[in-house]
Amino acid sequence: MKHIIFLSILLFSFACTYEQKEKKKEVEKTIEQFQALETLDENGKYTEWYPGHEQIKIEGRKDDQGRRQGIWKLYTKDGIEMSITVYTDGKKDGHIIVRYPTGILRYKGRYDMDERVGEWKFYDQSGQLTKTENFGSGEKK
């Protein structure tokens, strides 16, 4: 009888230990997925990941003051490029291309220090041009 009780306690404690180890692994995996969702390397390359680190969400460069510089890209969870935007000193300054989640062009245009300038074209979800709008030269008067 003592042996049966001893074996029961031993099996119970083994099962509890195994279950605790598995739960700990799950928690560690979850923590790992959400840690370091953003990285900034010594050259200013910024990368933000979707949870799980399997797909980049947004990438570009930052200057030493943390402002966006150059080309920035945004992606869907499936890796489809959603937008490309050019920045200067943290302001939109250059061409922008934005797509629907399917990858089809939604609109394109140009910014001059965060102001829309020039001709912008807008498209429907089938890729057909729906509207063209002119925002002028961007020169301040």
Image (cartoon, rainbow, N blue to C red):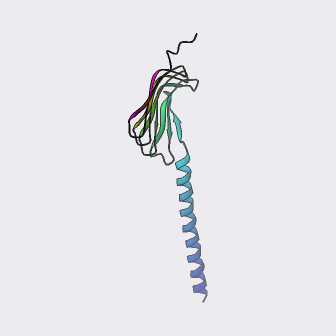
Queried whether the magenta region covers residue 122, the answer comes back as yes
Q: Residue furthest front?
A: 130
- Going 53% across and 42% down the picture, which residue do you hit? 37
The residue closer to the viewer here, 42 or 104, is: 104
Q: Position of residue 74 (x, y in %)?
A: 47, 36
| Residue 96 visible in the displayed image | no
For the record, the magenta segment spans 115-129
- Going 53% across and 63% down the picture, which residue do you hit? 22
Q: Is residue 52 above or below residue 2?
A: above
| Residue 105 visible in the displayed image | yes
The residue closer to the viewer here, 131 or 112, is: 131
The secondary structure that dominates the magenta segment is strand
Q: Quadrant of the N terminus?
A: bottom right
Could you tell whether 124 is left or right of 24 in the image? left
The residue closer to the viewer here, 141 or 70, is: 141
Queried whether the magenta region covers residue 37, the answer comes back as no
Q: Position of residue 32 (x, y in %)?
A: 53, 49
Q: Residue furthest bottom?
A: 1
The residue closer to the viewer here, 24 or 84, is: 84
Q: Is residue 63 above or below residue 73?
A: above
Q: Quadrant of the C terminus?
A: top right
Q: Position of residue 113 (x, y in %)?
A: 54, 19
